Amino acid sequence: MTDFVANAYPWIKTGHILSFVAWMAGMFYLPRLFVYHAERAQKGSELDETFKVMELKLLKLIMTPAMISTWIFGLLLISLGVVDWSQPWPWIKAVAVLAMTGMHGWLSKRRKEFAAGTNSRSGKQYRIANEVPTLLLLVIVVAVVVRPF
């Protein structure tokens, strides 16, 4: 069993990192699409329909599968016993990952509003929302790599 864990660990960690990178790319890009959609597209226009397709494909084909695989690989790492839960850093990371998942859900709801033609938020509001994943990324990476707590 020890050989299995020793061999599986780098592959599971690699899957976790790659999934997280893909998820973060979408978390940075979708709010930016919302900024442009809110500011430049008239309801029912060709541009409006183009943004709707782009947002749907980004969320359903990239972001959500990447989020799910990030969670799966992360839980597999935890199951291998490589996390010391007596330290603060994994708890801080866990809270930040839950917040990132919540942000993902919030963005998903906003996409549905755009799809229904009921978006009521401004480009400025989406610009502010675009900073949330950046702050959470900073917390997650610092907690894991620097472990300052």
Image (spheres, rainbow, N blue to C red):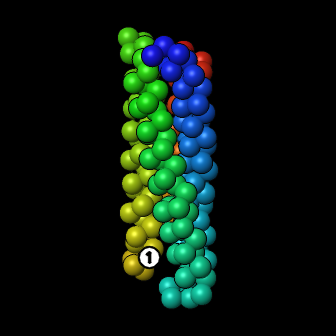
Q: Is residue 6 left or right of residue 106?
A: right
Residue type indicated by callout 1: Ala
Give the x, y percent position of residue 84: 43, 13
Q: Nearer the viewer, residue 109 or 19?
A: 19
Q: Is residue 35 left or right of residue 98?
A: right
Task: From this view, report whether residue 37 is shown above or below residue 84.
Answer: below
Residue beneath the point at 38% across and 47% down:
102
The kind of secondary structure element at disc 1 is helix
Q: Provide residue 141's location: percent of width, then percent of height.
A: 58, 29
Give the quadrant of residue 14.
top right
User: From this viewpoint, is residue 118 visible?
Assistant: yes
Q: Is residue 86 above or below residue 138?
A: above
* Dot 1 alpha-carbon crowd within 10 angstroms: few under 14, some 14 to 19, many 20 or more: some
> 34 or 140: nearer the eye?
140
Question: Residue 145 lies in what quarter of the image?
Answer: top right
Left or right of 12? Residue 96 is left
In this picture, is 22 found above or below 15?
A: below
> In the image as oriented, which residue stretches furthest toward the top?
86
Q: Residue at x 54, y 26 (%)?
A: 8
Q: Is residue 41 visible?
A: no
Tally of numbered discs: 1
- Residue 130 percent coordinates (x, y): 55, 52
Q: Residue at x 57, y 54 (%)?
A: 26
Q: Quadrant of the N terminus?
A: top left
Q: Would you name the residue on which mark 1 appears?
A: 115
> Eyeballing the image, is 119 above or below 143?
below
Q: Residue at x 54, y 31 (%)?
A: 12
Residue 147 lies, in percent from the top left, at 54, 16
